[in-house]
Amino acid sequence: MKVLMFGWEFPPHISGGLGTACFRMTEALVKQNAEILFVVPHRFEDEKENGSRIIGANEVKFNIFSPVLKKFCKNISFIEVDSQLIPYVGQRDYYNITNHTYQHQSVTDSHSLFRSFDFSGGYGENLLDEVDKYALVASQIAKDYDFDVIHAHDWLTYRAGIVAKQVSGKPLVIHVHATEFDRSGENVNQVVYDIEREGMTAADHIITVSNYTKRIVVNRYGQPLDKITTVYNGIEEQDANVRKIPNPFGKKIVTFLGRVTFQKGPDYFIEAAEKVIKKDKNIIFVLAGSGDMLNRMIALVGKKRISENFFFTGFLRGKDVERMFRMSDVYVMPSVSEPFGISPLEAMREGVPSIISKQSGVAEVVSYAIKVDFWDIDAMADAIYSLTHYPAISNMITKNASAELHKINWDKAARELIEVYNNVK
């Protein structure tokens, strides 16, 4: 089984759980004898080796006169009208490509036919430009490589998957790790929503990371239930016995770790923390992460006059995440809408009891975590207080959660993905 997989990030260059999920997923698929061609916008050449072949879209030479491009421009209208591509191919080249004027020119220098586009490989202000440019390059990749099925991760790569399907005729599977309703609530970005719906409609099959997300795909995007399969994320097992790291405060530590955005509910974490601190000032709260709400959260902590009990670490990755968990006594994930949520599993693996939002996919697969509605800050505060003051409760949850993790693994996810691939071939 040869899989052409489109993603937006790959370790160590990640900004959240998506990159980690792609890494572990492809690693497990390779164990199932799948051959993975994993495309990222920008290859930094230090990506972790896990048996996949990493292709950087920034390294692909694209023939601007090729029949593939003409077919692409003719059949995919969004490329023709999206002038945001201009900064990347040059104004004259873009105008000529989208208006099909190159075919009327005679060119003597064959080297001038090829272009390679640059990508930031991140989530900057030109993100929509890069999404369209990525799709343009995908048509060349689909022409140059041999594969059986296309697998596109999240909305950023759906257009690339659609183009690859049109060029190759191979089936397209899209993987919904999050939707615009998770990220923005009811204030959706219409452009992003349209891309998501376009990808879902064009796909031969849709994978969701939870039944929670499946319901959103059916109810909000109008997709048929029989077109969707839920494949839960996994967690890699710990190599050795967990060793707690003594924290420098000599106090209990309660941690939030994730993007500091509307979706992750950091404001509810702070509201609950305030209630706990009123009962016990000897608890430290750590908000680890970065995002558009970070400055507002710092200001909120100051406004509530609880800054002596709060620490902001910024974005953590790799060993720093592991160290943070091993210093923590409680992990809280108060997400407003969480398609899955790998971080509670990481915390459980490190022996940290977790409090998780009921509005999350991970709540479907774990029993030994305290589950609260994201908006119920009283219940959240009570759970934090209980886990920091009653060791018997904390120890019971930790012990049973550790055993439960053995059933949540990437090998199981990979077998289910292979079954989806076989059904659409």
Image (cartoon, rainbow, N blue to C red):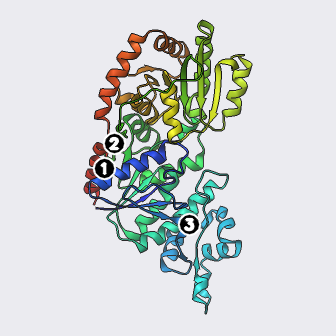
Which of the two residues, 183 or 33, is positioned nearer the viewer here? Answer: 33
Q: CA distance from mark 1 to mark 2?
A: 7 Å
Q: Which residue is the site of mark 3?
A: 58
- Amino acid carrying mark 2 in the image: Val
Q: Position of residue 84 (x, y in %)?
A: 66, 61
- The answer to which of 46 and 305 lies nearer the viewer is 46
C-beta proximity under 8 Å, tags 1 and 2: yes
Say which of 340 and 121 sits in front.
Answer: 121
Give the number of callouts: 3
Instruction: Give left or right: position of 372 versus 188.
Output: left
32 versus 328 height, above or below: below
What amino acid is at disc 3?
Asn
Q: Which quadrant: the N terminus?
A: bottom left
Q: Amino acid at mark 1?
A: Leu
Q: Which residue position holds label 1?
A: 417
Question: What is the x, y in percent for residue 153?
Answer: 45, 51
Q: Nearer the viewer, mark 3 or mark 1?
A: 3
